[in-house]
Image: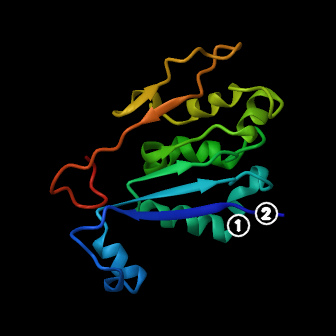
Amino acid sequence: MKWWLFLTISAGLVGRLSAGSISTIEELDAASVFHFSIMSDLGATCGANSFSSAVTVKGLEWMKSSEFVMGGGDEIKVMGTQFAAFLRTNTYYKANFYPCIGGGENRAYGGADTVWGSGSLFITNIPNFWSRPGVFKSTEPQDAYGNTSSYYATYTKKRGQKRGQSA
């Protein structure tokens, strides 16, 4: 069974809106200050051919209207997927994708879901991830292999900045 999650969230509504004042997604979109998306399980069963699905391609393009995209894990489960190469070359995703290391990434890089932290090597596929403004490596101890898969990131929207503009 193939499944993945593409979810876009509109946040920070401008002004005070009553429950009855928003009746369409377009009205919600117009009222929001920023958008972010969550993507998960892109590589759950798709493997190297995750981009062969028109739905996947459409979803990845659709999420570009977001200020950033958070991964929910399992974006890859095997080495050599198109998604890893995609992250190195796609201008939007290499600057705005924030991965979550899941069992799939651990399997791809460490040989098993249970090799905690080995999937952190997936982050190295994203150019300059650790040097992005607002990205901070965890100060917690690394795993036995020296991998750091924990981080936190901040997002700041400047007053007057239009949605989709870089901070």
First-in-chain label (1 vs 2): 2
Relative to 2, say whether 128 is above or below: above
Q: Nearer the viewer, mark 1 or mark 2?
A: 2
Q: CA distance from mark 1 to mark 2?
A: 11 Å
Q: In the structure shown, which secondary structural element does the residue marked by tag 2 occupy?
A: loop
128 left or right of 106?
A: left
In depth, the one of 42 and 5 nearer the eye is 5
Disc 1 + disc 2, Cβ < 8 Å? yes
Residue 62, given in percent of the width and then of the height, sits at 49, 67
In the picture, the quarter occupied by the N terminus is bottom right
State the image quarter where residue 142 is shown: top right
101 left or right of 87?
A: right
In depth, the one of 18 and 25 nearer the eye is 18
Q: Residue at x 57, y 66 (%)?
A: 59
Residue 26, given in percent of the width and then of the height, sits at 37, 81
Q: Residue at x 73, y 51 (%)?
A: 43
Q: Mark 2 sits on what residue?
A: 2
Q: Mark 1 sits on what residue?
A: 53
Residue 70, given in percent of the width and then of the height, sits at 52, 49
Q: In the structure shown, which secondary structural element does the residue marked by tag 1 occupy?
A: loop
Q: Residues within 10 Å of mark 2 (few under 14, many from 20)?
A: few
Q: Residues within 10 Å of mark 1 (few under 14, many from 20)?
A: few
